[in-house]
Image (cartoon, grey):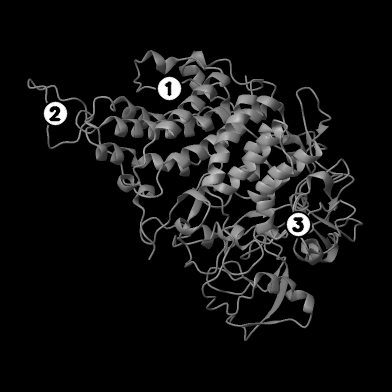
Amino acid sequence: MKKIIISLALLGTIALTSCNDSFLEKYPVTDLTEGNAFQSYNNFKTFMWPCYEVFAKTNIATSLSGVGQDSHYQGDRWAGYLEQKQESGFNKYAFQTVSSVASGNGWDFGYLRRVNIMLSHIDESKMNEAEKNHWRAVGYFFHSYWYMELIDRFGDVPWVDKVLNESSEEAFAKRMPRKEVADKVLERLKWAEENIGNFTSSDGANTINQNAVRAALSRFTLREGTWRKYHELNDYDSYFQECIRVSQLLMTAYPTLYGGTDGQPAAGYGEMWTSEDLSKIPGVILYKQYVKDINAANYCYMEHTSSHNIEMNQSTVDLYLMKNGKPIKNSLSNYHGDKNMYATFRDRDPRLYHTVIPPYKVTSGKGDYATWSYTSNPADREYIDIMGANTSCSNPGIGMKRLPGQNWSAALVPEIPRLGTGAFVTCRSGYYVWKNWSNWETNFNNGALNVADKPIFKIEEVLLNYAEAKFEVGQFDQTVADATINKLRKRAGIATMVVADIDANFDPERGKYYPKGNDAGVLVEPLLWEIRRERIIELMGEGFGFYDVRRWRMAPWFINKTQKGLWVSKTVATKAGYTLLNETTGLSDGVNGSMTEGYLFLYNDPVKEGKGWLEKYYLFEVPTTEIVLNPGLAPNNPGWD
């Protein structure tokens, strides 16, 4: 049984009562109050446990909370990388169905109150200076982590660094300019990095430490630096330099990537989200632990059912490189085409296989799904041999992603693609996402029994942050590529990036970004596009997409595309109850259409529908009720008034 690390379990909160106004003006020694709760080191530690729940706040797109569309897949759905399989699951930004809000929308400062209460009591405590600095640093981390989200959503936000009540003047403060707030966040994170103590023996393993602070710094400085550059706010170079500095320190501290244990291509990549104990995995800086009978989850279970609704579209599949390191449109790629799923997946980056179930077909045994056998067609076992065979559906044993698949009760999934939305392990596009799928976790209908840990900060993200920041300051060369992207590619089992080979012809269909006032867009520089591609693929399904496409000002390129599924015959589409996409009109070919084969129709072309990404979507709307309560928050973000 894995070691229970108590820091990530919600231990509850301290009930803080009001001050005692007796003539003695003393607090009852038997009751825990705000007056006596902040004396010792352990008082502060206990009070701060609930702050770890920030990593499960659903307002953060990388949140480890919920399942399906409300989980860590959320940010990549909004970015257009993934979608929900239902016909109603279209991208709300593509079709302009984002409604004005009176409340919510992530405008939440209540979380900061606990942090500010703790910070306000440090100086009067009985701790020594090192201990005081430690808890101030931990408080600054959590305060900054939430402000990272507020800035990303709203830009200008009030700065709240003290405990407020209804009569506090600061409760009606105006919004502080984004750059000023970001500078304050940077200042606090750097202070925390320099002053946080090494109290692992007291706090426990897997708690906020110097490397966790540095990981937050790496993420924040890249995000803010690129936002300032591509949204024309200036003053971004110092953020890139800070990202480079702190990322280098982490790369030295975590020199090894997890390579996997079972010989599968990209096994270390796939197992990062399906390992029972991430404390044993190299490169993991901070993670959320799930423990049997304490805080189990249902990530794996959900992906074995008909309720899992996350799929990938053809455009995102097309982003994955070939194993020789070339994009599919490169003349040297040796791409096998997309006229059947076997060809589409052949010789592709193995990280695709760990994100989308590869194609296969088997024959069931005696009708009880307890056994299966290969078909007479050798092609049907191509990806079973690559991923490793699931030798018994009734007793799959210890293992990660194996084929053929089975549902939560071990009933056989006889083939992939498996089109539909009703039966278990089906989807509309044909590209079924299975990032959390494992064969070793206990699954039971409607039961949260899964205990695979999930990463919060890991060195893979830091490598990508460093690579991108180095490009932005004009310092990305082969040495940097070898230290970052090529480490990831070596683990994945694909050819390394050769910087000298990447020119305008390397990928003739590379993406565009959209400077303000330029609706036509500008092609991303070839090398930068490959750096960004690596980030998209390595972090696919982890929620980073919506942060990335907005800071790059690339949202229209990703979100305005006509989302389509795999290429099938009309017979196959009709049998599954779907139609084909007419790429000329951007509409469904219909039941009586003339097409005999084509891409599965998922949703209309948003641009031809007169919709598409709007400039105002780069920032969220400040809820209208908040502005009524505090007119100092006006005006709203551009386009939302």
In the rendered image, the residue lying farthest to the right is: 594
Q: Provide residue 467's location: percent of width, then percent of height.
A: 67, 40
Mark 2 lies on residue: 27
Q: Earlier in the sequence, mark 3 or mark 2?
A: 2
In the image, what residue occupies the spot 61% across and 21% down? 637
Three-letter amino acid code at disc 3? Ala
Mark 3 lies on residue: 495
Quarter of the image for residue 197 reads top left
In the rendered image, the residue lying farthest to the left is: 23
Three-letter amino acid code at disc 1? Val
Look at discs 3 and 2 and give the one toward the viewer: 3
Secondary structure, mark 2, is loop
Nearer-the-camera pick, 338 or 265: 265
Mark 1 lies on residue: 160
Locate the N terminus by quadrant.
Answer: bottom left
Left or right: residue 230 compared with residue 191: right
Q: Earlier in the sequence, mark 2 or mark 1?
A: 2
Distance (Cα) linking label 3 and label 2: 67 Å
In the image, what residue occupies the spot 66% across and 69% down? 387
Look at discs 3 and 1 and give the one toward the viewer: 3
Secondary structure, mark 3, is loop
In the depicted structure, whether residue 569 falls above or below residue 473: below
Distance (Cα) linking label 2 and label 1: 28 Å
